């Protein structure tokens, strides 16, 4: 592929992903066909969201191998640095994606998640072989190769360290790195010692390769961090990145009490490369998306380049006078002599997008928006086309507001806005130790976007946030339901209704035992009441405020109605099990667990089947369901395809 300037290459991230919707269309667009269709008619609109997004990356003999995430099957592509194209492709038979890669000679090893399998790829040929798994753990988060060719890895959710010897096929379980911690997020290894970066409460554990003896080497003053999330090791220098403060420790492995502290202006260091020849360390930092250099001779930290706001470097490789970075779906090259930054989009280079597990859905009537990894798919209903808009993050909730779509984005709980014919623009960051939006709604009467969030890994205290697009005012209220996240939100008559989840940041053990429903006065910005609507339920996964009632749904599939005046539960019923979602269409309420769509009569609390057999596939949270503003249709998923359901 022809080399492109960085700005052009990154434009391809969004513009070049324009693809037609699925071939299931009949002669006319779905909106036209649906005029005569009976209620419950399902029209297929093609793949809901398609993406080329890569996680794990490794450099072998002039080729960067990258593994996809969120698509099935996992594709490992070999990007030839000289030819600037993907000239090798391998498919893995299991796994939802791959964060972990390592090389042993010309063999590439890939660790997958869901399930946690270990594969060997012969990069000189075509063989793909599963060699091990880490069950009962579900994720292989990190891999590293020892000087003698033995592989070491870290897992989730049991936070174990394991090894695999390619020479003998033997595996070894080194056990849990730190009791009570779920993540071994990073791994480095030398001739004698394994270094395991742990979270969601930060630890750096040195493990003797022979005896398995473990010792903590993280200096105690950094014990309040959440993760040792990234490690790099070269010539006795161990670089360790600490979250969420963007701190890097440069540790002498011969004497770990000797270390240097490097503080970046960002929150996270996502990639590190040590350049022993120049005595420099290169880092990729977020949220600014900056490539930086730390000069060990002068002690100076400098900025080299910013591919784009929010760029997330997955890996950095030093190749002579050039740095190679893997950023979402782009390979960037920074020339250390000229300071020039260029990039090649992997989609254009030969890794076409594939249907992914979508994360959120919304419609403004003329278009349906489906979010996923690093982007939003915009389906034009009249034109029957689908285009990809690049987003540096994952929109966990999307909310139509006055002709625009507002996106609540993971990580760092960003708020973005996007016009139908434009690209997403970051507006603000919720902050306050929040990272994962869980739900959002718009209050027309109050002109406020209301967002519920989960805190940072290892932290307690979710938040409800109120954003006024007119003034730009952001008002964040943390821990409004003690030690719980705000899982669902609804607004009516000047009150925000908040449904909680007992789960706090990932990597924590819940302190609460039951989900709570609270009322929050928008005029005084205070919580005015709080109840337990369904004893024993752990999450209130969705809320709708209709008439004089608040309808809520728990993870136990109990649907309850609360009188807004008395704040008492006045009725309950049950719905089909699963990760259910609610939408309101006029006086009716529709819900879905992904398999089926059902209809609720709020007056009688009667639930009746509406559409069956969807068997949707999506990523996290409740099933994806939204309603056309005019009440003519629902939009949902069937498999990984977007469908229109006539009302």
Image: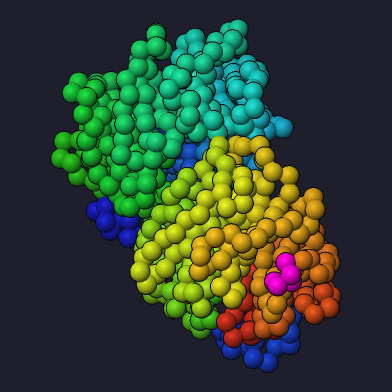
Q: Is residue 517 visible?
A: yes
Q: Residue 468 or 135: which is nearer the viewer? A: 468
Say above or below: 519 vs 514: below
Magenta segment boundaries in residue numbering: 563-567
Residue at 68% x, 92% y is 36
Whether residue 359 is situated above or below residue 202 in the rendered picture? below
Magenta region's main secondary structure? loop
Q: Is residue 558 magenta?
A: no
Indicate the position of residue 591 as horizontal and vertical percent values. 72, 70
- In the rendered image, the vertical position of residue 590 relative to residue 160, given as above or below: below
| In-image side of 591 versus 182 (left or right) | right
User: Where is residue 214 shown, x and y percent of the image?
Assistant: 57, 13
Between 473 and 503, the one nearer to me in the picture:
473
Quadrant housing the C terminus:
bottom right
Q: Is residue 437 above or below residue 172?
A: below
Of residue 173 and residue 435, the one placed in the foreground of this image is 435
């Amino acid at each position: 592929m022809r080399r492109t300037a960085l700005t052009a290459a990154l434009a391809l991230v969004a513009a070049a992903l324009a693809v037609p919707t699925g071939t299931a269309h009949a002669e006319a667009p779905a909106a036209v066909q649906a005029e005569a269709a009976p209620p419950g008619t399902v029209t297929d609109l093609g793949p809901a969201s398609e993406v080329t997004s890569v996680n794990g990356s490794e450099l072998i003999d002039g080729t960067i191998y990258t593994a996809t995430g969120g698509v099935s099957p996992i594709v490992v592509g070999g990007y030839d640095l000289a030819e600037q194209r993907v000239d090798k492709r391998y498919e893995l038979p299991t796994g939802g994606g791959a964060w972990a890669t390592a090389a042993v000679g010309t063999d590439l090893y890939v660790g997958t998640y869901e399930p946690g399998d270990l594969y060997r790829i012969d990069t000189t040929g075509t063989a793909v072989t599963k060699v091990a798994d880490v069950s009962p753990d579900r994720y292989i988060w990190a891999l590293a190769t020892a000087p003698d060719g033995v592989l070491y890895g870290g897992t989730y959710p049991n936070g174990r360290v394991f090894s695999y010897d390619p020479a003998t096929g033997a595996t070894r379980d080194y056990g849990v790195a730190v009791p009570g911690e779920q993540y071994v997020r990073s791994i480095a290894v030398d001739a004698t010692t394994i270094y395991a970066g742990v979270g969601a409460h930060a630890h750096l554990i040195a493990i003797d390769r022979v005896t398995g003896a473990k010792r903590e080497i993280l200096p105690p003053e950094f014990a309040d961090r959440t993760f040792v999330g990234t490690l790099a090791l070269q010539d006795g220098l161990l670089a360790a990145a600490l979250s969420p403060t963007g701190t890097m420790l440069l540790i002498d492995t011969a004497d770990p009490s000797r270390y240097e502290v490097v503080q970046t202006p960002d929150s996270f260091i996502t990639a590190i490369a040590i350049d022993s020849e120049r005595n420099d360390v290169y880092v990729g930092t977020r949220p600014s998306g900056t490539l930086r250099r730390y000069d060990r001779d002068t002690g100076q930290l400098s900025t080299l380049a910013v591919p784009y706001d929010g760029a997330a470097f997955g890996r950095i490789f030093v190749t002579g006078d050039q740095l190679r970075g893997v950023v979402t779906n782009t390979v960037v090259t920074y020339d250390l002599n000229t300071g020039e930054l260029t990039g090649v989009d992997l989609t254009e280079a030969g890794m076409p997008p594939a249907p992914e597990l979508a994360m959120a859905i919304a419609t403004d009537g003329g278009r349906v928006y489906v979010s996923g990894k690093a982007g939003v798919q915009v389906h034009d209903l009249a034109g029957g086309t689908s285009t990809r808009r690049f987003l540096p993050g994952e929109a966990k909730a999307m909310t139509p507001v006055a002709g625009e779509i507002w996106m609540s984005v993971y990580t760092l709980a960003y708020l973005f806005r996007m016009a139908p014919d434009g690209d997403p623009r970051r507006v603000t960051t919720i902050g306050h130790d929040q990272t994962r939006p869980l739900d959002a709604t718009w209050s027309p009467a109050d002109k406020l976007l209301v967002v519920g969030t989960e805190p940072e890994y290892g932290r307690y205290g979710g938040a409800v946030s109120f954003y006024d697009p007119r003034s730009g005012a952001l008002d964040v209220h943390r821990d409004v339901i003690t030690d719980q996240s705000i899982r669902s939100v609804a607004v009516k008559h000047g009150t925000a209704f908040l449904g909680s989840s007992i789960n706090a940041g990932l990597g924590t053990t819940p302190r609460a035992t039951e989900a709570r429903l609270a009322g929050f006065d928008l005029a005084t910005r205070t919580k005015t009441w709080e109840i337990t609507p369904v004893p024993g339920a752990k999450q209130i996964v969705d809320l709708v405020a209709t008439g004089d009632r608040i309808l809520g749904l728990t993870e136990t599939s109990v649907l309850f109605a609360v009188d807004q005046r008395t704040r008492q539960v006045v009725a309950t019923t049950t719905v089909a099990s699963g990760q259910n979602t609610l939408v309101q269409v006029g006086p009716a309420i529709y819900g879905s667990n992904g398999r089926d769509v059902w209809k609720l009569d709020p007056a009688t609390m009667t639930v009746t089947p509406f559409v069956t057999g969807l068997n949707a596939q999506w990523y996290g949270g409740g099933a994806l369901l939204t309603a056309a503003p005019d009440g003519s249709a629902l939009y949902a998923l069937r498999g990984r395809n977007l469908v229109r359901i006539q009302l």
